[in-house]
Amino acid sequence: GAIIGGIIAGNPCVACRCLTMNDFPQSIYLPAPTTPVALLVDGENLSVDHGETILAIARRYGVPNVRRVYGKTAHIAAWAELGFRLMPVRPGKNAADLLLAVEAMSLALRESFHTLIIAATDRDYASLAEHLRELGHEVIGIGEAQAAPCYSACCTVFHELAMTRPVPVAALPKAAPK
C-alpha cells in the first residue's frame, strides 16, 4: 500500500508484519473535531467595520456556527454580507440587549454551547457574562476600548477592538508648506 506519514495504508502485510493504518485508532490520523461556538453581536453599539476582526477572533475559539447580530434593521443590515443572521428588535429601551441576553441563555442551556462570544461595549452585558461564567461556560468578550470595565472583567477573556471611527478632517494635523 501507499506510505502515509510513515504508516503503510491498505491491507496488513503478511510477509513482513509491518503496521498499517488499519492498526491505529482513527483519532491518530484524522483531524480533531472543531468546537462549535455562538457569536452574538450587539449591532447597536458595534459597527460592521469590526465584522471581519470579530469573526477572526471567534475562529480562534472554534467554528462560529451561530452568528447573530441584534439591533434595529437599519443598524444591522450590512452584517448579512458577513454571514450573520439578522435579529431585528422591536421598538423599546434596550431591546437589542434584552434579546441578545435571552438568546445567549437559551444557547447555553438548551443548545449546549459551552463557548459564547459576546461582541459588545455595553455595561449591560456584565450580569449576563458573570452568570454564564458561573454556570461553567466560557464567555469571550469582544469590544472597543471604551467597554465598561465591569463587563470586560466578567468575561473569561476580553479582546479589545481597535477604533475604526473616522477622525474629523479638522482634527488632522495640517501638512507643512513645501
Image: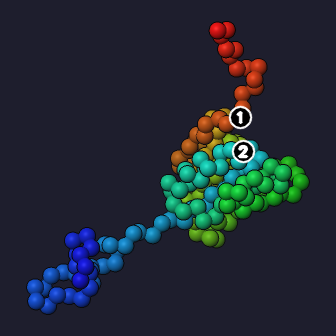
Q: CA distance from mark 1 to mark 2?
A: 9 Å
> Depth check: 150 or 56 in front?
56
> Against 6, is 149 above or below?
above
Q: Position of residue 50 (x, y in %)?
A: 65, 45
The residue beneath circle 2 is 47
Task: Indicate the amino acid at tag 2.
Answer: Ser
Q: Is residue 17 left or right of residue 118?
A: left
Q: Which mark is residue 66?
A: none
Marks 1 and 2 close (CB-CB < 8 Å)? yes
Which residue sits at x=32%, y=72%? 29
Q: Which residue lies under the disc numbered 1?
A: 165
State left or right for residue 42 relative to residue 61.
Answer: right
Q: From the viewer's perspective, is residue 23 above or below residue 126? A: below
Query: Residue at 31% of width from left, 72% of height from top?
Result: 28
Residue type at numbered disc 1: Arg
The foreground one among 13 and 163 is 13
